[in-house]
Image: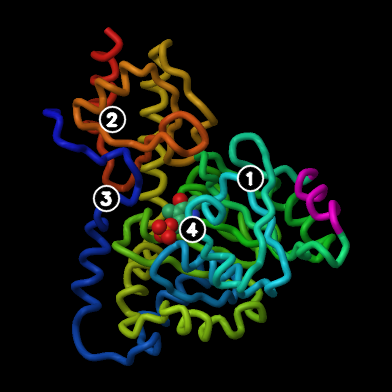
Amino acid sequence: MDGTPNYCFASDNTSGMCPEVMQAFVEVNRGRVPSYGDDVCTAEATNAFRALFETACDVYFVFTGTAANSLSLASLCQSYHSVIVHEYAHVETDECGAPEFFSNGTKLLLASGANGKMDPHVLEQIVLKRRDIHFPKPRVVSLSCPTELGTVYTPTEVSALGEVAKRHGLRVHMDGARFANAVASLGVSPAELTWKAGVDVLAFGGTKLGSPVGEAVVFFDPALGEEFAYRCKQAGQLASKMRFLAAPWKTLLGQNLWLEIAARANGFARLLRLGMEQFPELRLLHPTEANAVFVEMPEHVHQHLNARGWRYYSFIGGGSRFMCSWSTTNEDVEALLSDIRVALS
Ligand SMILES: *Cc1c(COP(=O)(O)O)cnc(C)c1O
């Protein structure tokens, strides 16, 4: 590398769309079809979600993860409600107050917990802390899976949180911006990690997986999503050429591509971590359970990597984050490790 900026590990959204999705656009581009989701491709993509989740879920396609999270949370809450989230949750740290805005004031209550995960006891403490009319009433628990620190909740862990939620009349929302990576990591069925574990609504990420744009909001209890289409339209999230938001999903879910891509990205993250663990000067943070590696490096290593062009974030949960995606290669991993080796020698 010659010092030109390299965004390979900066995020999984620095990659373009994967070739299969690109091809899907060429195909879905043909002809004139009904707009606003009344087309065959949107129906097929929706059915693909129902087959994948083994249930008659309702599915809505929106443009961004922020829209998927904040609109689905708003649909579960009144303005006087609260949503319990981990302090590192994207809805708290990276959505510019969109959940509060779209719900007209619903408050986020922050829970702490190791490795980006919420503990059922902490959840229950927060639910029970205030029960009076002067405090916003807890209504939803929102879990990120994978978490913002690259760890995953197992179905058993989701169930334990879901059980506390149900006991106190809370709904369960899952921010699955990298849901595919969690499923690939755990080797469980999408149903086991969601509705079978008590999840009511899932924001399933397509962008970081391999789409150019677009996330799916999946309601496992169709009653909860009854008027969601109005909410999407009002928020400017109802695509008139809906087929272009649906087509990537039809392709990704069609032949298990979603799982293969996610497993490959996870594999490169494991490879990168193993490589980094060879250097005693580096301190790996958090288990690598999805497609992210978090590491603390000496300042001179940062300086060398930056001079060589490597770009990555160092503001999430301590340490520096290296993300892998569908486009990561062995050569990328080797090049990064080689530059770290030089910096340390
Ligand atoms: C990327 C991401 C989102 C969605 O972000 P947008 O930029 O709004 O698409 C949501 N949650 C998590 C955990 C993310 O990493």
How many neighbours does mark 4 have within 10 angstroms: few (below 14), some (14-19), or many (20 or more)?
A: some
**Residue in view at x 30 percent, y 11 percent:** 344
Q: Does the magenta stretch include residue 143?
A: no
Q: Residue 341: x, y in percent? A: 28, 14
SS for tag 1? loop
* Sequence-first tag of 3 and 1: 3
Q: Disc 3 versus disc 1: distance between alpha carbons?
A: 28 Å
Q: Which three-letter amino acid code belongs to the residue tagged 3?
A: Ser
**Residue in view at x 52 percent, y 56 percent:** 176
Q: Which three-letter amino acid code belongs to the residue tagged 2?
A: Val
* Sequence-first tag of 4 and 2: 4
Q: Disc 4 versus disc 1: distance between alpha carbons?
A: 25 Å
Does the residue at mark 3 contact the one at mark 2 (Cβ under 8 Å)? no
Q: Mark 2 points at which residue?
A: 333
Q: Which residue, as the protein is rendered here, is positioned at the far right?
A: 132
- Please determine whether, in this image, residue 130 is positioned above or below residue 116: below
How many neighbours does mark 1 have within 10 angstroms: few (below 14), some (14-19), or many (20 or more)?
A: many
Q: Residue 93: x, y in percent? A: 52, 50
Of residue 141 and residue 161, the one placed in the foreground of this image is 141
Some atom of ligand 1 lies within 8 Å of the CB belonging to the residue at label 4: yes
Q: Does the magenta stretch include residue 124?
A: yes
Q: Disc 1 versus disc 2: distance between alpha carbons?
A: 28 Å
Disc sitting over residue 15 in the figure: 3
SS for tag 3? loop
Q: Mark 4 points at which residue?
A: 95
Q: In which quadrant of the rendered image does the C terminus lie?
A: top left
- Please determine whether, in this image, residue 130 is positioned above or below residue 243: above
* Sequence-first tag of 4 and 1: 4
Disc sitting over residue 154 in the figure: 1
Which residues are the magenta region? 121-130
Does the residue at mark 1 contact the one at mark 2 (Cβ under 8 Å)? no
